[in-house]
Image (spheres, grey):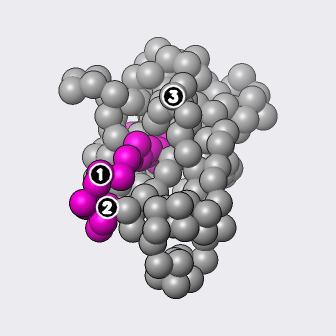
Amino acid sequence: MKAGIEAMNIYCGSAAINVRDLAKRRNLDNERFENLLMMEKTVPMPYEDPVSNAVNAAKPILDRMSDDEKASIDMVITCTESGLDFGKSLSTYVHHYLELGRNCRLFEMKNACYSGTAGFQMAVNFVFSQVAPGKKVLLICTDITRMSVVEGLSELAFAEPSSGS
């Protein structure tokens, strides 16, 4: 029995800004950003959210799959710290927009710093458990930061260049 990553894709949004230019505009010490090794950061557009990012990342993978392979996706796990509302899991939206099977298990894990790792471990253990032999898990890690700098809160300004979607 094997379990692992069959395919991977990334979608980070449609717009980006130069980190050094942003830091300069915010009157931040550029030396502090040397260790980030960043050139650009994403800037989420008003039409982008964790669901649209998740679907844009997953859709090319599903588009390359046969109908049988798509039908073998038996679980969708979304890992995020972002939310759209206070009740519905992002996985339900992802499931809908990717047109996955109606019997697919869906759930969301919160805690951006660890949920992706925990979600991967959950996916591997689901495959190894043989609860649904031959089935696959679609694991999506998605998050978005919408931040504005507030006058007098300079510590937030240093977080802005390293956040995005």
Name the magenta segment's main secondary structure.
Answer: loop
- The residue tagged 1 is 150
Residue type pointed to by label 1:
Val
Residue depicted at 51% across the width and 28% down the height:
46
Which one is in front, 109 or 84? Answer: 84
Compared with 145, 63 (above or below) is above
On residue 46, the disc is 3
Mark 3 surroundings within 10 Å by alpha-carbon count, few (fewer than 14), some (14 through 19), many (20 or more): few
Q: Is residue 136 visible?
A: no
Residue at x 25% of width, y 61% of height? 153
Q: Badge 2 local density, few (<14 within 10 Å), some, or many (20+)?
A: some
Where in the figure is residue 145, as x and y percent of width and height? 41, 46
Mark 1 in CB contact with mark 2 (< 8 angstroms): yes
Q: Is residue 16 magenta?
A: no
Task: Report if residue 97 is visible in the image.
Answer: yes
Residue placed at 58% from the left, 50% from the top? 42
Q: Secondary structure at mark 3?
A: loop
Which numbered disc, 3 or 1, marks the residue closer to the eye? 1
Residue kind at label 2, given as amino acid type: Leu
C-alpha distance separating marks 2 and 3: 21 Å
Label 2: which residue? 156
Kind of element beneath mark 2? helix
Q: Nearer the viewer, mark 2 or mark 3?
A: 2
The region drawn magenta spans 127-156
The structure residue drawn at horizontal position 45% and vertical position 72%, both measured from the top left corner, is 28
Seen in the picture, residue 156 relative to 132 is either above or below; the reply is below
Between 32 and 41, the one lying in front of the other is 32
The residue type indicated by label 3 comes to Pro
Is residue 158 positioned above or below 6 on the image?
below
